Structures are given as structure tokens and as C-alpha cells.
Amino acid sequence: QVQLVESGGGLVQTGGSLRLSCAASGRTFSSYAMGWFRQAPGKEREFVTTIIRSGYVTYYADSVKGRFTISRDNAKNTVYLQMNSLKPENTAVYYCAGHTTSRYIVTMPREYDYWGQGTQVTVSS
């Protein structure tokens, strides 16, 4: 069984930065790809970014491209989300998730097998 635990959320002003972490345990971390999703109040969970098992390929939603960076450290069983130039519309609960499909780009929540509990990110204007 895989457990994912996010940390690093908080309150930040517009234009600020946050770095989220997601620590994994259980199954060998390098055996599954990872992604970040977010969900704002009253909205559906939306894809943010994904990274393949090796970390060499990443993919971003257009809304965060150039501002957010996903990375992973397989030796530390951790995936990160560096968020820069934050905007109020980025306010949401951020979730890390893992999937075992063979495809590189997986953006649908239903295709992810493992989920963390989420961490709140609030960007004040």
C-alpha cells in the first residue's frame, strides 16, 4: 500500500512562492509516476503537473507553465512542487498523486491510483 503525505502549504501574498513536498512510503517510489492536482472550493479537481518515474519528463497545465516546477528525488521518496509568481486564483487544496500506467502524460484524476490528503495553499491579494 502506498501512502502519500503532502506538506509545505500555507498563506502567501500574490507574487510569492511556496514549495510543496510529498513524501511517499510503501511501494518502491520509482515504480510509479507522480502528479499534482488542486481543488478550489466549489470546483472540480484539476490537473497541475506530472512527472514520469525517472523524472526526465514533465508536463504542465497551461495555467501554471513557466511558474510551477515539478521534480522528484527517488532516493528520498519525495516529489516536489515549486510554485512561483503565485496568484489568488491558485488558492486551492493541492494533492499529490501516483499512477502506474505506462503513459507519460496522465492528466485525469481517475487514472491515478494513490492520493495524498492534500495541503491548503492560500494566495492573498
Image (cartoon, rainbow, N blue to C red):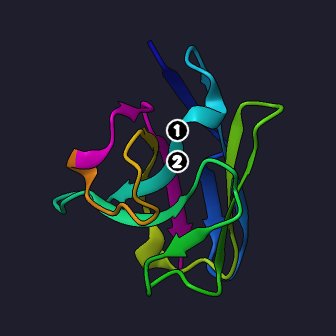
Q: Residue at x 43, y 78 (%)?
A: 61
Residue that badge 2 annotates? 34
Magenta highlight on residue 118: yes
Residue 32's disc number? 1
Name the one closer to the observer, 119 or 30: 30
> Looking at the figure, which quarter contains the N terminus?
top left
Is disc 1 placed on a helix, strand or loop?
loop
Q: Position of residue 109 (x, y in %)?
A: 26, 51
Position of residue 39 in the picture relative to residue 44 (left or right): right
Magenta highlight on residue 114: yes
The residue most toward the right is: 75
Whether pointer 1 and pointer 2 mark residues with C-beta atoms closer than 8 Å, the reply is yes
Q: How many marks?
A: 2
Is disc 2 placed on a helix, strand or loop?
strand
Q: Residue at x 26, y 47 (%)?
A: 111
Q: Residue at x 33, y 34 (%)?
A: 113
Q: Position of residue 125 (x, y in %)?
A: 53, 80
**Amino acid at dot 1:** Tyr
Q: Is residue 23 visible?
A: no
Q: Residues within 10 Å of mark 1 (few under 14, many from 20)?
A: many
Q: Which residues are magenta?
A: 111-125
Q: Position of residue 98 (x, y in %)?
A: 45, 40
In three-dimensional space, the C-alpha distance between marks 1 and 2, rounded to whole angstroms, equals 7 Å
Q: Residue at x 60, y 77 (%)?
A: 86
The residue most toward the front is: 102
**Amino acid at dot 2:** Met
- Which image quarter: residue 6? top right
Q: Position of residue 8 (x, y in %)?
A: 67, 44
Name the one closer to the observer, 90 or 26: 26
- Which image quarter: residue 5? top right
Q: Decide: is 53 above or below 47.
A: above
